[in-house]
Image (spheres, rainbow, N blue to C red):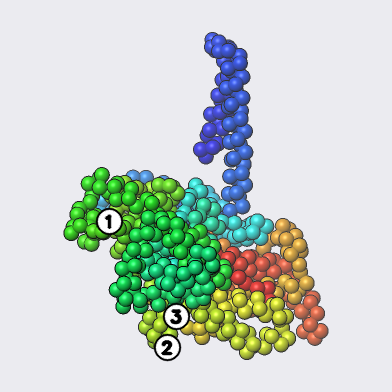
Amino acid sequence: AFQENEIKLLTAEIERLKNSGCLGVSPSLEGLREENAKLKYRLNFLRKSLQEERSKTAKSMININSCLQEIFGAAIQAAYPDLENPPLVVTPSQQPKFGDYQCNSAMGITQILLKTKEQKVSPREIAEKISKNIPANECIEKVEIAGPGFINVHLRKDFVSKQLSSLLMNGVQPPAVGKRKKVVVDFSSPNIAKEMHVGHLRSTIIGESMCRLFEFAGYDVLRLNHLGDWGTQFGMLIAHLQDKFPDYLTVSPPIGDLQAFYKESKRRFDTEEEFKKRAYQCVVLLQSKNPDFIKAWELICDVSRKEFQKIYNCLDITLIERGESFYHEMMKDIVKEFEDKGFVQVDDGRKIVFVPGFPVPLTIMKSDGGYTYDTSDLAALKHRLCEEKADILIYVVDSGQSVHLQTVFAAGQMIGWYDPKVTRVAHAAFGVVLGEDKKKFKTRSGDTVRLIDLLEEGLKRAMDKLKDKERDKVVLTAEELKAAQMSVAFGCIKYADLSHNRLNDYVFSFDKMLDDRGNTAAYLLYAFTRIRAIARLANIDEQMLRKAAREEVLILDHEKEWKLGKCILRFPEILQKILEDLLLHTLCDYLYELATTFTEFYDNCYCVEKDRQSGQIVKVNMWRLLLCEATATIMAKGFDILGIKPVQRM
């Protein structure tokens, strides 16, 4: 609308320039030509931009819930123009007898009228008034008022059919989300010299999936790995490296087991006083950027990086490393900024900052002049807000860090780095992984479970499952079997995490996650391969499906066709909800609902009809095959957002 208005204004301005000589104005001819050329360039740019925007919007999947909210928002505004911010509640109906969607705003408006205007009006009367003011639109067939004032909405079948055809022709397009924003996601974040364990699993999987969702929605996403790669622990590691591999500067040290190396250095630090003193000296030399000590630090970091990358490769994780060391040079400026603004207090030699509403202060400098995690987290926050210019900043960190992060965010707000009304800074917290005994997930010996061991166990169990079903004997080639193993193993581990509300703890169970019944990746992956096989077994290729999508009208007369069609089109509203609340289990629940709704459809509606005697295909109901294709297309995009790789044959 803004672009259209500017085009009108520019067109009028060009016309004015043409006629300027007749209006008693006598500017130079050269000046007129130059201004006219600039205006025409801007006009052409705007027309092209508007055309691209319209094309993009035309291809975007329509969020039906948002459309209905706009329609009912206009109806409420027309019915009650004096009401400020009236409640707008539109939800999918739970039962077919209540229509396809429901508007439940009437009850809320009743309360507002009673409180603000002392008018006692029944919700049913309000619902009737809203219904009479519904503007002309392409999606609503009819509305009915039920019970105390629910407005049941019935969608038009031709509208749903048209949206499904658009999906089939254009593919799964992201919902329109407005201006392209910059999103920074902080996730995974293991510590150098320590192995990734099961505690890193959730942050890594949830963070990756959030990035994929925001990228699909058209945001500019920066994926950051805030490695623990700086601090006092490097003093003992470097001192131990010097003792064990004295020629480390010329010969790359063969550190095979970094975890054992870390434990050895920690034992010496705790028991050998001389070693402890030397470790502290090493920290000072490292922080003063002594080249030999920087080289030792880099060697230790490189060994860790290689181990981390093995896990990231398995799970298909993409990250940009930006550890604590990246922010080290910024920390003195952070301390100075808080001092200059009068926020710093000195307590027993420490420099601390109290943030209103938080009882524990942030320590931004220790009594020995060293910095803390608080300082590095503040430096990272400022860099992401002021240098990276993030519009949305998400920290995928366990719930135990909640108070710390909220204090850091509040400090950033207090000092003026961001306004929460403009910039969204969120902690996407998550619970812990539990063993089947409902206690923290540990090995039998009580150690933390190494993530690499967990992934290898997943691969073994996935192959056992496939062999139990004899997929290795007649169904799959060796290559297909390997692909299925990887898909099931890593898909099940990811889905078991993502299908639980991230705020809760969840029980890790290979038996449950590999079960091909119920809401599991194994069930969904198998359902997906079955759906993809339907057209293939009917000898219908992609080209024939594309041609049919352009020419066929999707008939939705059977109740199961109608139910499936509506379920497919709920995908954009599911994504929109997750963009707002960052709860990915909603997508898993939706995919499971879509798969079970498809099964109902397939059991009741013949897609391919065969002769009972010969088994020969006698009829292909192409519109139903198109519904199969639309279902598979949505499932594939859902899997992609969750980081799960389906296979064509299982």
31, 20: nearer the viewer: 31
Q: Label 1, label 2: how many angstroms apart (C-alpha)? A: 43 Å
Residue 202, can we see it? no
Label 1, secondary structure: give it. Answer: loop
374, 573: nearer the viewer: 374
Characterize the local packing of mark 2: few (<14), some (14-19) or many (20 or more) Cα atoms within 10 angstroms.
few
Q: Quadrant of residue 365?
A: bottom left
Q: Amino acid at mark 1?
A: Gly
Q: Quadrant of residue 446?
A: bottom left
Characterize the local packing of mark 3: few (<14), some (14-19) or many (20 or more) Cα atoms within 10 angstroms.
some
Residue 128: x %, y % from top left = 41, 56
Q: Amino acid at mark 3?
A: Val
Of label 1 and label 3, which has the lower sequence position? Answer: 1
Which residue bears the numbered disc 3?
A: 449
Which residue bears the numbered disc 2?
A: 444
Residue 628: x %, y % from top left = 66, 69
- Label for residue 369? 1
- Label for residue 81? none
Which marked residue is nearer to the observer: mark 1 or mark 3? 1
Of label 1 and label 2, which has the lower sequence position? Answer: 1
Whether residue 11 is situated above or below residue 144 in the rendered picture: above
45 sits to left or right of 90:
right
Q: Label 3, label 2: how many angstroms apart (C-alpha)? A: 9 Å
Q: Amino acid at mark 2?
A: Arg
Residue drawn at (29%, 73%) of the image: 273
Label 2, secondary structure: give it. Answer: loop
Label 3, secondary structure: give it. Answer: loop
